[in-house]
Amino acid sequence: MSETTELPEIERPNGFPVPPLLPLAGLLGGLLADWFLPGIPGGWITSLAGVALVGLGVWVAAKAVAAMTKAGASPLPNSPELYLATEGVFAVSRNPIYLAFLIILTGIGLTFRSAGVLIAVPVVGLLLYVLVIRSEEEYLAGRFGAEYEAYRARVRRWI
């Protein structure tokens, strides 16, 4: 009998394997689209608002990773979860890392006054929901049952 690293289906979410690739693709696609789109109006205030949003997004992501680590949960996508993170930023959003991706992407769009990147934000949000979040939520419901359902009832998906 040989050892296997395969886990039963309930032990690992089956979503998109590398979720950070979605906002990265949105960023690159948006920047490419800028060749065909006019820039958004604004000056240094728009850029400053963008930098602030990038900072906010990085802060939210860092707080989410810290909350997951504190709870014993893994911030790595598609890894088995032994614990459900519900404290810190997870008390405000069920998906704070994905929310952080969207905040950062919006900030980059404003910083560089990129219409293409700003158009990519809702597209990336939809792709995150369809390709990642739905399967993760299904996995967490199966893994944690009533505990996850209670969490889901009291905390919104985004904010």
Image (cartoon, rainbow, N blue to C red):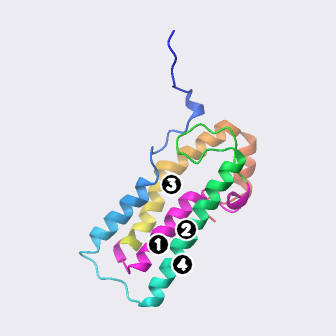
Which of the numbered marks, if any, corresponds to residue 58? none
Q: Are marks 1 and 2 in contact (CB under 8 Å)?
A: yes
Give the residue type that dot 2 points to: Gly
- Residue 95: in magenta span: yes
Label 1 or label 4, whichever comes before in sequence order? 4
State the image coordinates of residue 7 (x, y, percent, origin top left). 55, 27
Which badge, 3 or 2, is on the more N-terminal residue?
2
For label 4, the residue is 52
**What is the spatial separation of the Cα atoms under label 1 and label 2, in whole angstroms?**
9 Å
Instruction: Establish if 124 lies above or below 113.
Output: above
- Tell me which numbered mark, 3 or 4, is placed earlier along the sequence: 4
Q: Secondary structure at mark 4?
A: helix
Determine the residue positioned at 50% across, 65% down: 102
Question: N-terminal of the two: label 2 or label 4?
Answer: 4
24 or 13, which lies in front? 24
Magenta part of the protein: which range? 87-116
Residue type marked 4: Ala
Q: Which mark is residue 57?
A: 2
CA distance separating discs 2 and 4: 9 Å
- Depth-wise, is mark 1 or mark 2 nearer the camera? 2
Report which residue position mark 3 lands on.
Answer: 129
- Most extreme residue toward the top is 1
Q: Locate the C terminus by quadrant.
A: bottom right
> Circle 3 sits in a helix, a strand or a loop, which is it?
helix
Which of the two labelled residues, at mark 1 and mark 2, occupies the earlier sequence position?
2
Front position in the image: 1 or 132: 1
**Type of secondary structure dominating the magenta stretch:** helix
Q: Which residue is mark 1?
A: 106
Q: Secondary structure at mark 2?
A: helix
Task: Reply yes or no: does residue 128 show up in magenta.
Answer: no
Indicate the secondary structure of the residue bearing disc 1.
Answer: helix
Give the Cα separation between the discs numbered 3 and 2: 18 Å
